[in-house]
Image: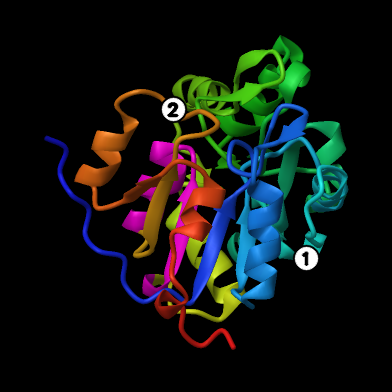
């Protein structure tokens, strides 16, 4: 018999994963746009969290609006939008190893880099580009990873994400990447701070057991796993064992939360 999760505590805001929760491939997941509308009606604050590092926040907002979602780019939190502050904090001068579409959201490329900022470069994960980044690292440069997910579900099936390529550079340069995106604790806490809500009163809703659910719980948030997107058999039991909840979809999660669970949202 599957273990029962701890009861949800007081909820004041939500963090919602994007791919696999709001949409999949070229279409919104059934009921997800209406769920966002209900959050608006109930004045429940939320942010959209995504490890997507191929498009800018503006482009993602336009895509979501095309699927029927009422969202603004300022409500989207991405690793690229957080990277500049982290690099400035560390005094790092980056070589950018990201998808070209993401460049508007990234810090400027340094003429003499002493670090590599790496994201999901897609078809740009070539030997030449990997080797260029490797040479920055082998000279003592620091590796920053916007994300290290293993894979995601695209329009034609599962696709490799940045994680396997980050691991290759870590191995080759004998270094360890500093993670900026999910499941980094700093990423979840940054989003909670944007809401102005204590982490323990925020619920992360996602389809990725490791990156969304376990990462959020480790950061002190509550979490719910949805059975859409990349959800696989066996994930539910593991999520419940770790203290998370499981819902059929974002729509089911929102519909299943009585108004009494939300406080300070009027």
Q: Position of residue 37 (x, y in %)?
A: 71, 62
User: Does the magenta-highlighted stretch encompass residue 216?
Assistant: yes
Q: Is residue 83 visible?
A: no
Rendered image coloring scheme: rainbow
Q: Quadrant of the C terminus?
A: bottom right
Q: Quadrant of residue 153?
A: top right
Neighbours of disc 2 within 10 Å: few (<14), some (14-19), many (20+): few
User: Residue 211: percent from the left, percent from the top?
Assistant: 45, 41
Q: Which residues are magenta?
A: 200-218
Query: What type of secondary structure mainly makes up the magenta span?
Result: helix
State how far apart marks 2 and 1 are (Cα): 37 Å
The answer to whether residue 238 is left or right of residue 141 is: left
- When the figure is inspected, residue 266 is found, relative to residue 208, above or below; the finding is below
Q: Quadrant of residue 67?
A: top right
Instruction: Look at the image and say whether residue 140 sits in the magenta stretch.
Output: no
Residue at left offset 29%, top offset 42%: 239
Q: Which residue is mark 1?
A: 74
At mark 2, the secondary structure is: loop
Q: Is residue 24 above or below residue 194?
A: above
Q: Is residue 185 left or right of residue 165?
A: left
Is residue 18 among what the camera can see?
yes
The residue carrying mark 2 is 174
**In terms of depth relative to the viewer, which is nearer, 85 or 266?**
266
Please name the residue shown 59% across and 28% down the image. Answer: 162
Q: In the image shown, does 118 or 77 lie closer to the viewer?
A: 77
Q: Residue at x 79, y 31 (%)?
A: 99
In the rendered view, tell whether residue 19 sits above or below residue 243.
above
Residue 231: x and y in percent read: 45, 30
Please report whichever mark, 2 or 1, sits nearer to the chain's N-terminal start: 1
Residue at the image point whose x is 71% and y is 18% from the top: 125
Between label 2 and label 1, give the one nearer the viewer. 1
């Amino acid at each position: 018999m599957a273990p029962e999760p701890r009861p949800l505590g007081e909820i004041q805001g939500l963090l919602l994963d994007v791919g696999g929760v709001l949409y999949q491939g070229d279409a919104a997941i059934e009921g997800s746009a209406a769920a966002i509308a209900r959050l608006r009606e109930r004045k429940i604050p939320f942010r959209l969290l995504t490890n997507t590092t191929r498009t800018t926040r503006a482009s993602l907002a336009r895509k979501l609006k095309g699927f029927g979602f009422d969202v603004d780019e300022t409500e989207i939190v991405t690793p690229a939008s957080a990277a500049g502050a982290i690099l400035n904090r560390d005094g790092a001068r980056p070589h950018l190893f990201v998808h070209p579409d993401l460049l508007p959201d990234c810090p400027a490329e340094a003429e003499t880099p002493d670090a590599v900022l790496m994201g999901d470069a897609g078809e740009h994960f070539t030997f030449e580009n990997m080797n260029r980044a490797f040479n920055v690292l082998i000279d003592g440069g620091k590796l920053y990873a916007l994300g290290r997910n293993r894979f995601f579900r695209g329009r034609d099936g599962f696709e490799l994400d940045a994680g396997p390529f980050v691991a290759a550079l870590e191995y080759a340069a004998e270094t360890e990447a500093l993670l900026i995106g999910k499941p980094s604790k700093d990423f979840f806490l940054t989003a909670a701070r944007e809401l102005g809500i204590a982490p323990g009163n925020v619920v992360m809703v996602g389809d990725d057991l490791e990156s969304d659910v376990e990462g959020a719980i480790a950061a002190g948030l509550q979490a719910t796993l949805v059975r859409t997107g990349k959800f696989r058999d066996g994930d539910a039991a593991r999520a419940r064992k770790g203290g998370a909840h499981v819902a059929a979809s974002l729509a089911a999660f929102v519909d299943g939360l009585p108004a009494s669970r939300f406080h300070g949202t009027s």
